Image (cartoon, rainbow, N blue to C red):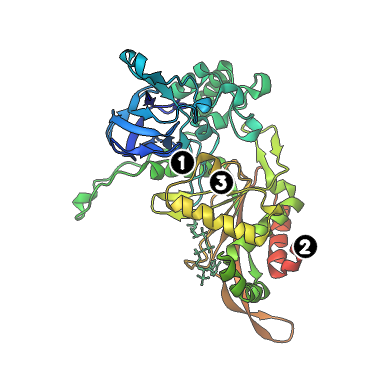
Amino acid sequence: MASEIIVVPDLGGAEEVEVIEISVAVGESVELEQTLVVLESDKATMEVPAPFAGKILKLLVKEGDKIVKEGVALLEMDVVASDTASDQIAGAAPVTDSSKAAGPSKTSISAAVTTASQADAKSSIAGIVEASPASQALTPSTPATAEPTQSAAAVYAGPLVRKLAREMGVDFAQITGTGPRNRILKEDIQNYVKQNIASNAAGGSAIPVVPDTDFSQFGACDVVSMTKIEKLTAANMQRSWLNVPHVTQFDDADITELESFRQSLKAESEARKVKLSPVPFILKACAVALTHNPVINRSIHADGASYTQKQYVHIGMAVDTPRGLMVPVIRDVDKKSLWEIAEELTALATKARDGKLRVKDMQGACFTVSSLGAMGGQGFTPIVNTPQVAILGVSKAQIKPQWDGNEFLPRKMLPLALSYDHRIVNGGDAGRYMTEVVKLLGDIRHFLL
Ligand code: CAO
């Protein structure tokens, strides 16, 4: 037997984390990777998993504790099987009974960053939350060399540069690194700040603040603190709204045939235990159309001088959860069957609602679908989930009369709204994309072509 102190992992830039849940009790036996403690920063919730099977000896923090640095002891565990995950543990050195006098060893483990948010969270209407570059930086214990490249939506930067960026309140997502492999250098941060100051001095992006009002003078009311996700969502929506010149284009897809095909799959759907709503068809149509309309699968760089053309088709799906809106990502949607998409959508939506999404579940989307179809409404204008360049808003399908040249026919029409970033997507590009989505949904045999 040996005992280990489990400590707060690398916070990847978070200023402070709060212990929001102690998931184990003293004396409890835990399995390898069982969640011990859940920490929450401004940017994400992190589960700290057990690095080995063992028994909880002592809790060293309590729920509500605020922790400002990594390495702080969380709890002490007896190691049952010391050979389990120690390979995965950087510097784990279980203390044997004979050496216990020196105290238990400290284990810094890789915490699983779960639900939400986005430092650089991307937002959409009413607060979509998706993981993004800076929240990826939150993934603890990721060695600098393992950080993905900027084009893969992550950031190369050393600890001092990260510290400087934090102090200056600079968002890495706004910066193109000029170092090797796009590494962000100190000079990049300084230049970015200088440019911002110059732009503000020239009357650029400074916006007037809306003054607070004391509403109690008008009647009974309460002041309520916003949750972290709500605050992030508000900031992200504003950032997208201010940076992206939005255009929204509307169309209706005739899904009469799609709906009768879907209804014909009811028995199979029940047998497979997979819910097949219209949403997987919409995701598939968006993905197929993305492969034919690469303009919609770009991300413009912050310098406005270049863009990344993606060759993969990952789609974010807005999910309404009690904690706020989350956008889990279904990867390679163009290559998946409708059943696979439906299954993944249900699994990710469940994870989102249970607060179990990991940062990687929310990263890498090329495009977002936001469906309010189950709720109703005739249309809405979604906000582009930057650095993506387009988002599709889906409203409730309804029977509407359609003129076929001779008579009006009752057809099931699905209202769609495509918002796009007009810096990089022209009206023609968006029109072609939307027309293809409408055509695919109107006759899903085109999925095969
Ligand atoms: N028109 C008419 N009916 C629709 C529809 C549409 N466009 N889309 C879905 N429906 C129906 C479904 O068929 C289902 O009906 P049945 O139970 O009779 O089959 C019902 O609405 C409920 O669907 P659901 O919500 O359980 O599943 P879904 O696949 O349609 O949606 C998900 C999944 C994750 C998108 C959804 O649960 C959700 O969270 N939606 C909210 C997203 C949101 O808030 N977006 C706005 C973000 S920006 O502020």
Circle 3 residue: 385
At numbered mark 2, what does the secondary structure look like: helix, strand or loop?
Answer: helix
How far apart marks 2 and 3 lie (CA) works out to 29 Å
How far apart marks 3 and 1 lie (CA) works out to 20 Å
How far apart marks 1 and 2 lie (CA) works out to 36 Å
Circle 2 residue: 448
Which is more foreground, mark 2 or mark 3? 2
Amino acid found under the numbered disc labelled 2: Leu
Which mark identifies residue 253? Answer: none
Residue 38, horizontal then vertical, whole percent: 38, 37
At numbered mark 1, what does the secondary structure look like: helix, strand or loop?
Answer: loop
At numbered mark 3, what does the secondary structure look like: helix, strand or loop?
Answer: loop
Which is more foreground, mark 3 or mark 1? 1
Residue 374 in view: yes
Residue 338, horizontal then vertical, whole percent: 65, 61
Q: Earlier in the sequence, mark 1 or mark 2?
A: 1
Mark 1 C-beta closer than 8 Å to ligand 1: no
Residue 227, horizontal then vertical, whole percent: 35, 44
Point 52% across, 30% down: residue: 137
Amino acid found under the numbered disc labelled 1: Thr
Residue 370 in view: no
Point 48% across, 19% down: residue: 91
Q: From the viewer's perspective, is 294 left or right of 355?
A: right
Circle 1 residue: 114
Q: Residues within 10 Å of mark 2 (few under 14, many from 20)?
A: few
Q: Earlier in the sequence, mark 3 or mark 1?
A: 1
Point 72% across, 81% down: residue: 404
Tell me if residue 325 comes above or below residue 273 in the rendering: above
